[in-house]
Amino acid sequence: MTTTTEAVPTPATAGEPLRPHAEQVYAAELTALAAADDRPRPPHWRLSPWAVVTYLLGGVLPDGTPVSPKYVGSRRLVEVAVATLATDRALLLLGVPGTAKSWVSEHLAAAVSGRSTLLVQGTSGTTEDAIRYGWNYARLLAEGPSDAALVPSPVMVAMRTGAIARIEELTRIPADVQDALITVLSEKTLPVPELGDEVQALKGFNVIATANDRDKGVNDLSSALRRRFNTVVLPLPAREEDEVAIVSSRVAEMASSLELPAVPTAVEEIRRVVTVFRELRSGLSADGRTRIKSPSATLSTAEAISVVTSGLALSAHFGDGQLRAADVAAGLVGAVVKDPVSDQVAWDEYLEVVVRPREDWAAFYRACREVG
Ligand SMILES: Nc1ncnc2c1ncn2[C@@H]1O[C@H](COP(=O)(O)OP(=O)(O)OP(=O)(O)O)[C@@H](O)[C@H]1O
Ligand SMILES: [Mg+2]
């Protein structure tokens, strides 16, 4: 035996997961909310709808326990999403990339059911098995169809336990496979003809689907299925202040979960990244005076978060421990210039026309030029 085997950690010694689930990270908040929550809860819900909204948007509980905001945006929109889950209609979160659809879906499932992991990742290769059930073929061959040979999908598990199932990127799933959801959503049952049986959904069961209206059109959601969903559109952050707040808080969380060496939060650099993204997205400089070309990239809040996080890693490991313009420049140019020809033209124009004249942006201008 070589020592290599010893170096491989066993699950017991492997330590913390890289990305714990929402219900793990916010377990304390969820417990405190459940204790403070005296409003009526729909069957099988861990919290009342009011407490779920408080969990998402943040607040202070009567006993003074703070609840951190997870989603920054309109209260009404979150209320509509939560109220939908308490009805017989499913919830479809729709929006351009990086508008926190998956994030909101995970937190909703964690708050409502205490479990965000009943998840189907939609792709063009998703089969009906992933939505209904499959078989353990060894047992199927040995024993014939039986309960023990059946491999339930996350949707089936959610039906049996009265929990929320999540379907990511619903519109990437081929249309005929999507249709497997119709019976589930309208009849709340999943027939298993091989066993002459069915799984009836318990109260509390519902589905949250997400779909992205940029990468692939939502038109491929059949109208029969669409009628079974309430659609909530998640917008890009309306105000620059909100976007700066989102990026700052997420970057701080990421940096601590990645255990990056501490770098002081550099609000000016974060604000600058957000400004650049918003100006390029809208095709207009912040003062409203200069029109510019928008690049093909989405430039979502999620990308702004990763530009700043990479900048922090650069600064912590290779820089002077302060987040500098040069640390964010490389990631920023990479996020903007996705198409080496047309995006490069738009970016160069933006640098010359908008960035260069700003006196307090001189270091940033130089850093971007060096990357280019
Ligand atoms: N309004 C917001 N409030 C809080 N966080 C936000 C907001 N908008 C974006 N984010 C952050 O952006 C990140 C990415 O979000 P997420 O992956 O959920 O996007 P998405 O809409 O599912 O994108 P995609 O279409 O690419 O799947 C998350 O870390 C989330 O915290
Ligand atoms: Mg997503």
Image (spheres, rainbow, N blue to C red):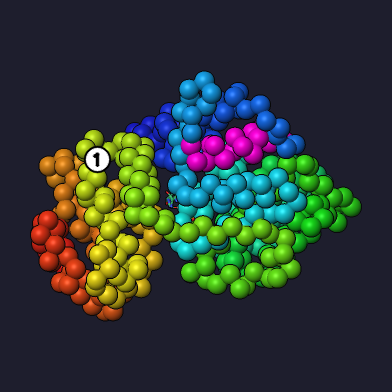
Name the side, left or right, on which 24 lies relative to 263.
Answer: right
Relative vertical location of residue 108 with respect to residue 62 in this rendering, above or below:
below
User: Element type at marker 1?
Assistant: loop
Q: Is residue 2 visible?
A: no
In the rendered image, residue 203, in percent from the top left (x then y), is placed at 77, 41
Name the side, left or right, on which 316 lies relative to 177.
Answer: left
Q: Nearer the viewer, residue 327 or 46?
A: 46
Q: Residue at x 52, y 20 (%)?
A: 63
Residue 48: in magenta span? yes
Instruction: Specify the amino acid type for callout 1.
Output: Thr
Q: Residue at x 73, y 37 (%)?
A: 42
In the rendered image, residue 77, in percent from the top left (x then y), is placed at 56, 52
Name the side, left or right, on which 164 lies relative to 260.
Answer: right
Q: Which residue is mark 1?
A: 265
Residue with the most extreme right position: 196
Q: Characterize the local packing of mark 1: few (<14), some (14-19) or many (20 or more) Cα atoms within 10 angstroms.
A: some
In the rendered image, residue 55, in percent from the top left (x then y), is placed at 53, 37
Q: Residue at x 31, y 61 (%)?
A: 277
Residue 46: in magenta span? yes
Q: Is residue 13 visible?
A: yes
Name the side, left or right, on which 113 lies relative to 336.
Answer: right
Q: Nearer the viewer, residue 194 or 137?
A: 194
Relative vertical location of residue 126 with respect to residue 261 in this rendering, above or below:
below
Q: Nearer the viewer, residue 58 or 290?
A: 290
Residues in magenta? 44-58
